Amino acid sequence: VVGRPEAEAKAMLAAAQTPVSPWTNYQGHAQLPDRLLQAVCVGCVLSTTPSPGTPVAPGTQVNIAVRRE
């Protein structure tokens, strides 16, 4: 879901039975260098915890970080 718009990413995770944490980590220039922010569009997912590709059991909560600016 990294790189996808926030709503789309949340829908994909819900479809995979991996609920998204009710807390979203919005990050911008104050938290990350430009080179990392340039990797995704504003409003798109920067990262997830557990990290992408990590096998998880259905029902495992996923935390997402979203680019805010």
Image (spheres, helix red, strand yellow):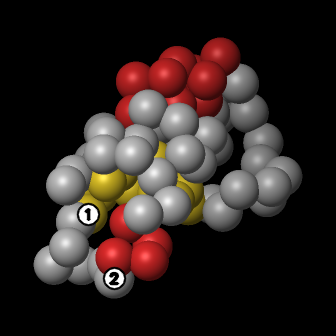
Looking at this rendering, what residue extends furthest in the bottom direction? 33
Q: Are marks 1 and 2 in contact (CB under 8 Å)?
A: no
Q: Residues within 10 Å of mark 2 (few under 14, many from 20)?
A: few
Residue under numbered circle 2: 33
* SS assignment at label 2: loop
- Residue 21 appears in the rendering: no
| Along the viewing direction, whichever of 38 and 32 lies nearer the viewer | 38
**Picture mark count:** 2
> x, y percentage for residue 19?
52, 32
Q: In this rendering, is residue 1 above or below 27? A: above
Is 60 positioned to the left or the right of 33 in the image? right
Q: Quadrant of residue 54?
A: bottom right
Q: In this rendering, is residue 43 above or below 31? A: above
What residue appears at the point 46 percent right and 52 percent down from the top-left corner?
Answer: 40
Q: Residues within 10 Å of mark 1 (few under 14, many from 20)?
A: some
> x, y percentage for residue 21?
40, 43
Q: In this rendering, is residue 68 above or below 39? A: above
What residue appears at the point 80 percent right and 55 percent down from the top-left corner?
Answer: 53
Residue 27 tag number: 1
> x, y percentage for residue 14?
57, 22
> x, y percentage for residue 29?
20, 73
Q: Amino acid at mark 1?
A: Gln
Is 49 positioned to the left or the right of 17 in the image? left
Quarter holding the C terminus?
A: bottom left
Q: Quadrant of residue 31?
A: bottom left
What residue appears at the point 77 percent right and 48 percent down from the top-left corner?
Answer: 56
Is 37 positioned to the left or the right of 27 in the image? right
Q: In this rendering, is residue 18 above or below 45? A: above
Q: CA distance from mark 1 to mark 2?
A: 10 Å
- Residue 16 appears in the rendering: yes
| Mark nearer the viewer, 1 or 2 | 2
Q: Amino acid at mark 2?
A: Pro
